[in-house]
Image (tube, rainbow, N blue to C red):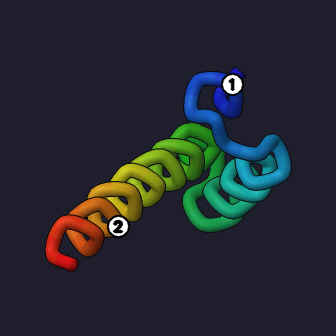
Amino acid sequence: MIGQRTNASPLLVFFALLGGAKLFGLAGLFIGPVALSVTAVLLKFWSASRDAVR
């Protein structure tokens, strides 16, 4: 469900779930995918701003 909405690889979402759970416990099951989504958006903005400067 998360991977379909964010266009993220299911394997990447799986690792985000596992990593979040490992770092933050049960709450990490929600924090991990959110952190993945925020990171993906920030990387897209950074990439777009780099392309605009060139």
Nearest to viewer (mark 2 / mark 1): 2
Viewer-proximal residue among 44 and 31? 44
Please give the name of the residue rendered at 28% of the width and 69% of the height, measured from the top-left corner: 51
The spot of residue 48 in percent (x, y) is 29, 60
User: Is residue 35 left or right of 54 when viewed as pictured?
Assistant: right
**Relative to 23, residue 53 above or below:** below
Near mark 1 (Cα within 10 A), the count class, few <14, some 14-19 or many ≥20, is few
Please give the name of the residue rendered at 68% of the width and 25% of the height, measured from the top-left corner: 4
Instruction: Identify the disc placed on residue 4.
Output: 1
The spot of residue 47 in percent (x, y) is 35, 67
Question: Label 1 amino acid?
Answer: Gln
Q: Earlier in the sequence, mark 2 or mark 1?
A: 1
Examine the image and state in which quarter residue 24 appears.
bottom right
The spot of residue 43 in percent (x, y) is 39, 63
Question: Label 2 amino acid?
Answer: Ser
User: Is residue 35 left or right of 32 when viewed as pictured?
Assistant: left
Instruction: Looking at this view, name the residue that lies furthest to the left.
Output: 53
Say what secondary structure mark 2 lies in: helix
User: Is residue 37 left or right of 28 when viewed as pictured?
Assistant: left
- Give the labeled residue for mark 2: 47
Viewer-proximal residue among 8 and 30? 8
- Is the C terminus in the top left, top right, bottom left or bottom right quadrant? bottom left
Please give the name of the residue rendered at 48% of the width and 46% of the height, measured from the top-left corner: 37
Say what secondary structure mark 1 lies in: helix
**Relative to 33, residue 2 above or below:** above
